[in-house]
Image: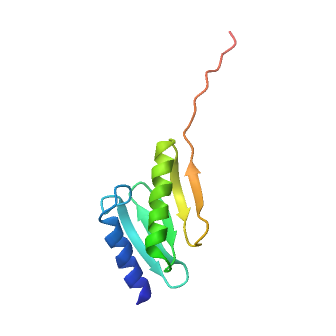
Amino acid sequence: PDLVKEAIQLLELSSGSKVLNWGTISEVHLDSIYGINIFTIDKKRIEFDTKNIVDKWRKVEKILTHAELIGIEGKYINIILDNMGVVNFDLPVVETDTEEDG
């Protein structure tokens, strides 16, 4: 029951979010061991537990906003711990000029 309540709270938070809203969320998975996983249409995975949902939601919004500002994309965010988040980024591909012999 708490897991469902927290998932509903996350969805309510997403309804007012500019970076992670109903238009970007594709799935919400609930698991009694792993907590709440949000999957987005652009293949992000965000892991939450059931504690301090509002604070952790705000942290995820900050992470996504900052990543967008500096031109990288967070593909996996684990925000289960209160004092730390784990983020896996897809860095932009930088093309380099190569000279061919010839």
Report the side of 10 relative to 16 (left or right).
Answer: right
Which sits in the foreground, 64 or 47? 64
Q: Quadrant of residue 61?
A: bottom left
Which sits in the foreground, 26 or 60? 60
Most distant residue in the bottom direction = 1
Q: Position of residue 81 (x, y in %)?
A: 59, 72
Q: Residue at point 64% right, 20% down?
A: 98
Q: Position of residue 50 (x, y in %)?
A: 49, 80
Most distant residue in the top direction = 102
Q: Position of residue 49 (x, y in %)?
A: 51, 77
For residue 1, above or below residue 83 = below
Q: Quadrant of residue 3?
A: bottom left
Q: Residue at point 49% right, 76% down?
A: 52
Most distant residue in the right direction = 101
Q: Number of labelled discs?
A: 0
On-image quarter of the N terminus: bottom left
Q: How is the image coloured?
A: rainbow
For residue 89, above or below residue 7 = above
For residue 70, above or below residue 57 = above
Q: Residue at point 57% right, 51% down?
A: 89
Q: Position of residue 68 (x, y in %)?
A: 46, 46
Q: Residue at point 47% right, 56% down?
A: 62
On-image quarter of the C terminus: top right
Which sits in the foreground, 96 or 82? 82
